[in-house]
Amino acid sequence: MIASVRGVVAGMTPDGAVIEVGGVGLAVHCAPGTLAGLRVGAPARLATSLVVREDSLTLYGFADDDERQLFELLQTASGVGPRLAQAVLAVHTPDIVRKAVANADLATLTRVPGIGKKGAERLVLELRDRIGPVAVGPDGAAGVTTGAWPEQVRQALVGLGWTGAQAEQAVAAVAETVDGEAPPVPVLLKQAIRLLGKTGR
């Protein structure tokens, strides 16, 4: 198993990065929050998990080992594959996920695209005893990730090559379309990229 990669960021896309290690470019699938911390041409270290299928080898990358461990634990639950596990970590931090599972907070878990009430109940039932220590925080911690979405999207856009000013304008435009509860960060990031694609770089 490839537990981590360290090298130079050779390129980035909305859903991943290419890390050059020893002259080989490794394509790594990453959530927006992880991509926000990367810059093309800069050195990076990602915790990784290699998912092996009959017809593919897919490398998923994370900001730290904690995210990777939770990613792998989530996949031990019925009906959870790597894409859904990564979606969970794209919407919530590991601490929020652990707290939601430990407290049977179905509302927080169902904020993840692809997880309905039954899926959330299954996660709680199957992972509650194995989720690990839960960080103690203020009530309402489940809303932390969505409250921070403008900065996450802005950093991801800058990492993808747009200027800070362009990123700020795109985030402001996307914010105007958000009425009430914000969609998951990946959805907002794609919307911002579409807007920037129309205006050009």
Image (cartoon, rainbow, N blue to C red):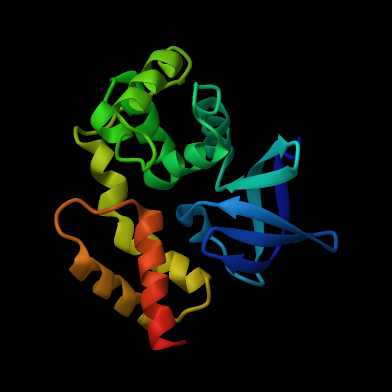
Residue at the limit of the structure toward the bottom, as seen here: 200
Q: Position of residue 121 (x, y in %)?
A: 33, 20
Q: Position of residue 148 (x, y in %)?
A: 30, 55
Q: Nearer the viewer, residue 44 or 167?
A: 167
- The residue sitting at 72% across, 53% down in the picture is 6
Task: Name above or below for residue 182 compared with residue 124.
Answer: below
> Would residue 64 be found to the left or right of residue 118 on screen?
right
Residue at the limit of the structure toward the front, as seen here: 55
User: Looking at the image, how many numbered discs can be counted on the residues?
Assistant: 0
- The residue sitting at 46% across, 54% down in the picture is 33
Please state, as top left, top right, bottom left or bottom right, where the N terminus lies in the image.
top right
Task: Name above or below for residue 75 compared with residue 128.
Answer: below
Residue at the limit of the structure toward the right, as seen here: 23
| Residue 164 in view of the camera | no
Q: Residue 167 falls in which quadrant of the image?
A: bottom left
Q: Residue 73 falls in which quadrant of the image?
A: top right
| Residue 75 in view of the camera | yes
- The residue sitting at 41% across, 22% down in the picture is 123
Task: Name above or below for residue 42 compared with residue 163.
Answer: above
Q: Position of residue 8 (x, y in %)?
A: 71, 64
> Would residue 28 be found to the left or right of residue 196 on screen?
right
Residue at the limit of the structure toward the left, as seen here: 180
> Would residue 166 be found to the left or right of residue 24 on screen?
left
Q: Position of residue 48 (x, y in %)?
A: 65, 43
